[in-house]
Image (cartoon, rainbow, N blue to C red):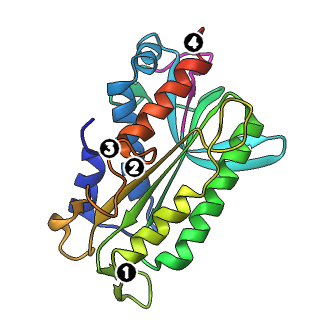
């Protein structure tokens, strides 16, 4: 598979702000683009009008809600309006029943504190998703910054220094400890991915997609290819008769 092109284009063009939803939207775009490109069953279900996607979708379990970054699920009973925006051919709308729920997060600075928060978020995400529906595919994607410096726009704004590759590796090691599901009905994420970038948030065009240490390499369960393939495989198995 190709690298997540649209996500990298966003970071190189607009940078990263932790209080903006733009980077999360770019992560969603990259996921949907590759699911449509590499998952024939998902693409076929979109073509037949069965699936829509939504960003920041509220997943309800009784009175308990979880705001999932990306939800892909069955189209509204009234159908998909012709005016609905589309992403890689998939229309946007509120799913009736969510089939795929993705948590998309980033650790760009303050790695040691953020890594614990991200693990907590991912554990809570798969727990809530599988309480919603045991067959729903729960996935989590995290961007990890491997740059030695990073400009934080959050007051007090300024450059933050990192010890690399130690800081990035520390986050990736914690991500490896997130519970992985052994199959439908079992706790854990059905797919987990880590994308590593080298980004100082100043010289935006030089933002680099890291493919060597400390990034997961091809064949690693957390590599981008594996992340997309695991979502596809779980979807194929759970919705084979849909």
Residue 175 colored magenta? no
Residue under the point 62% across and 20% down: 238
Where's the N terminus, which quadrant? top left
Image-based side of 17 in relation to 99, left or right? left
State the image quarter where residue 204 is shown: bottom left
Q: Residues within 10 Å of mark 2 (few under 14, many from 20)?
A: many
Residue under the point 15% across and 65% down: 205
* Residue bearing mark 2: 27
Q: Nearer the viewer, mark 4 or mark 1?
A: 4
Q: CA distance from mark 1 to mark 2?
A: 20 Å
Q: Residue 89: in sight, yes or no?
A: no
Q: Are marks 3 and 4 in contact (CB under 8 Å)?
A: no
Residue under the point 73% across and 45% down: 128
Q: Earlier in the sequence, mark 4 or mark 1?
A: 1
Q: Are marks 4 and 1 in contact (CB under 8 Å)?
A: no
Q: Tell me where the magenta segment starts and ends, as one range.
A: 71-81
Q: Position of residue 228 (x, y in %)?
A: 42, 36
Q: Residues within 10 Å of mark 3 (few under 14, many from 20)?
A: few
* Residue bearing mark 4: 240
Q: CA distance from mark 1 to mark 3?
A: 31 Å
Image-based side of 206 in relation to 54, left or right? left
Q: Are marks 1 and 3 in contact (CB under 8 Å)?
A: no
Q: Earlier in the sequence, mark 2 or mark 4?
A: 2
Relative to 222, residue 152 above or below: below
Q: Secondary structure at mark 4?
A: loop
Q: Are marks 2 and 4 in contact (CB under 8 Å)?
A: no
Q: Earlier in the sequence, mark 2 or mark 3?
A: 2
């Amino acid at each position: 598979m190709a690298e997540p092109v649209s996500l990298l284009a966003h970071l190189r063009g607009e940078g990263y702000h932790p209080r903006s939803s733009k980077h999360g939207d770019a992560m969603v775009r990259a996921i949907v683009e590759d699911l449509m490109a590499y998952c024939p069953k998902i693409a076929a279900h979109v073509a037949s009008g069965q699936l829509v996607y939504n960003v920041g979708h509220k997943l309800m379990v009784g009175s308990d809600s979880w705001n999932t970054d990306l939800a892909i699920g069955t189209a509204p009973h009234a159908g998909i309006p012709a005016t609905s925006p589309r992403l890689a051919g998939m229309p946007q709308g509120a799913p009736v029943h969510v089939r795929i729920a993705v948590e998309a997060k980033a650790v760009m600075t303050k790695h040691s504190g953020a890594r614990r928060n991200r693990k907590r978020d991912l554990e809570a995400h798969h727990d809530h998703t599988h309480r919603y529906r045991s067959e729903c595919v729960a996935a989590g994607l995290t961007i990890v910054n491997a740059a030695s410096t990073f400009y934080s726009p959050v007051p007090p704004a300024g450059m933050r220094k990192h010890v690399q590759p130690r800081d990035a590796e520390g986050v990736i090691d914690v991500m490896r400890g997130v519970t992985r599901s052994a199959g439908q009905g079992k706790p854990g994420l059905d797919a987990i991915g880590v994308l590593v970038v080298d980004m100082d948030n100043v010289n935006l065009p030089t933002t680099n997609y890291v493919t060597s240490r400390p990034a997961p390499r091809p064949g690693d369960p957390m590599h981008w290819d594996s992340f997309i393939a695991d979502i596809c495989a779980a979807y194929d198995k759970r919705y084979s008769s849909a």
